[in-house]
Amino acid sequence: MTDTAKVKGPASYFPSIEQKYGQPISHWLTLVAGLPPMKHMEIVALLKSEHGLGHGHANAIVAYVLAGKA
């Protein structure tokens, strides 16, 4: 077994999100965590329409936050 486990799930998208959108992942996690209560897909739609994120990237961020990992 190696010392560094492969990242799985929503967090596996984080490096590409940072590279593509030019913000650290903490920016996106804080933004989503600070929103009023909304449904998962409502937050995904907001990230897509107001911040230009792609569906998969927005979905990964929202899933991570709503799972209580952020």
Image (cartoon, rainbow, N blue to C red):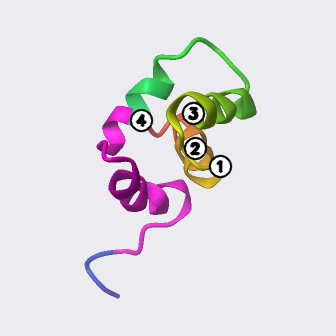
Q: Which residue is mark 3?
A: 47
Q: Say which of marks 4 and 3 sits in front.
A: 3
> Counting residues from the N terminus, which is met first, the one under dot 4 or under dot 1?
4
> Counting residues from the N terminus, which is met first, the one under dot 4 or under dot 2?
4
> Counting residues from the N terminus, which is met first, the one under dot 4 or under dot 3?
4
Amino acid carrying mark 2 in the image: Ala
Q: Which residue is mark 4?
A: 28
Between 28 and 19, which is closer to the camera in this rendering?
A: 19
Q: Secondary structure at mark 4?
A: helix
Proximity of marks 3 and 2: CB atoms separated by less than 8 Å: yes
Q: What residue is shown at x 39% (from left), y 27% (from top)?
A: 30
Q: Quadrant of the N terminus?
A: bottom left
Q: Quadrant of residue 29?
A: top left
Give the CA separation, mark 1 to mark 3: 9 Å
Proximity of marks 1 and 3: CB atoms separated by less than 8 Å: no
Q: Quadrant of residue 67?
A: top right
Give the CA separation, mark 4 to mark 1: 14 Å
Proximity of marks 2 and 1: CB atoms separated by less than 8 Å: yes
Give the CA separation, mark 3 to mark 2: 6 Å
Q: Secondary structure at mark 3?
A: helix
Q: Position of residue 36 (x, y in %)?
A: 58, 11
Q: Position of residue 53 (x, y in %)?
A: 54, 44
Q: Which residue is mark 1?
A: 55
Query: How many tags in the picture?
Result: 4
Give the CA separation, mark 4 to mark 2: 9 Å
Span colored in magenta: 5-27
Q: What residue is shown at x 35% (from left), y 44% (from top)?
A: 25
Q: Which residue is mark 2?
A: 58
